Amino acid sequence: MPDRLGAPLNEPLFERLALIGIGLIGSSLARVARSKGLARTIVAADASGEVRAKTAELAIADKVAETAAAAVAGADLVILCAPVGAMGTIAQEIGPYLAPGAILSDVGSVKASIISAVAPHLPAGVHFVPAHPVAGTEYSGPEAGFATLFLNRWCILTPPDGADPKAVERLSAFWRAAGANVEIMQPAHHDLVLAITSHVPHLIAYNIVGTAADLEEVTRSEVIKFSAGGFRDFTRIAASDPIMWRDIFLNNKEAVLEMLGRFTEDLTALQRMIRRGDGQGLSDLFTRTRAIRRGIIEQGQETAAPDFGRRAGER
């Protein structure tokens, strides 16, 4: 793993990194920050006492704080790794304790609503640079993280108007050192793009797995026993953290509904092709979609290897 991430930095980018929320993303950030020497001190906090105990047991942070306020005191980089719906409450709690000049960021899959919820609680002199690492697995919790989670994945930064360019560059350097590629994007545009590339696919996965489980003529045991590759892939996506995805859909409502409307229109057209026996139309559609898959592999965002190329311990 160290050779895949590269050598540790000669000097840390930040003195004190505070991670609020130690699930898959937070624990992976703690691991890569330690492996690469991105921060001199790593402090973790979580609302769950059980998660805090597990984090301490795993020793992935230098210190586990009892509260978010205690964790951020003196930190020059604070990253909120909690569900989207909790961001505003956390910002209200930590606002008075953020150090002047500190950078506050997050890892949420929705950006416009997070900016609206967080920004009002921040004191002058704190630099707010929202971010979204487009990486993850269906697993959650502090034990689910691994240092290479962000390797060759994209991290999208969505700095609000007036953000300090130096703070944006410092955070960009942090994510690049963690192995990610960095893109700058407007918050609203980010939400629209992620609605079709991530949010609607998850919604479809939750729905199709639920439909299969509800079919009266198919028993639950048969659904599990005879799952073909496509359905297994859907169940992997549908196993993602329910609280996180609940908050994503509620906080990216407009973009998700817009993309879901377009999807519904295309699905109706597909139904029409099948009903009319339009083999050429079906073949043309499947050829186009196959090319998208090849493009994703060529850009290094997926592998053509069986089982997604996963290896034990790297998920």
Image (cartoon, helix red, strand yellow):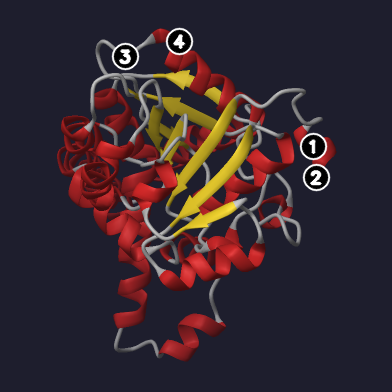
Q: Could you tell me which secondary element the residue under label 2 belongs to?
A: loop
Q: Could you tell me which secondary element the residue under label 1 belongs to?
A: helix
Q: Nearer the viewer, residue 79 or 270?
A: 79
Q: Considering only order in the chain, which callout, 4 or 1, is on the residue closer to the N terminus?
A: 1
Of marks 3 and 1, the one in the foreground: 3
What residue is rendered at 41% in x and 26% in y? 103
Residue identifier under label 1 = 4
Residue identifier under label 2 = 1
**Which amino acid type corresponds to the residue marked 2 in the rendered image?**
Met
Q: Could you tell me which secondary element the residue under label 4 belongs to?
A: helix
For the residues labelled 4 and 3, the Cα–Cα distance comes to 9 Å
Taking the view exactly as shown, the residue that stands out farthest to the right is 3
Residue 162 location in percent, x, y? 26, 10
Q: Considering only order in the chain, which callout, 1 or 3, is on the residue closer to the N terminus?
A: 1
Residue identifier under label 4 = 166
Q: Nearer the viewer, residue 232 or 84?
A: 84
For the residues labelled 3 and 2, the Cα–Cα distance comes to 35 Å
Proximity of marks 2 and 1: CB atoms separated by less than 8 Å:
yes
**Which amino acid type corresponds to the residue marked 3 in the rendered image?**
Ala
Residue identifier under label 3 = 163
Residue 78 is at least partly visible in this image: yes
What residue is rendered at 40% in x and 90% in y? 219
| Left or right position of 185 against 161 | right
For the residues labelled 2 and 4, the Cα–Cα distance comes to 31 Å
Position above or below: 163 against 174: above
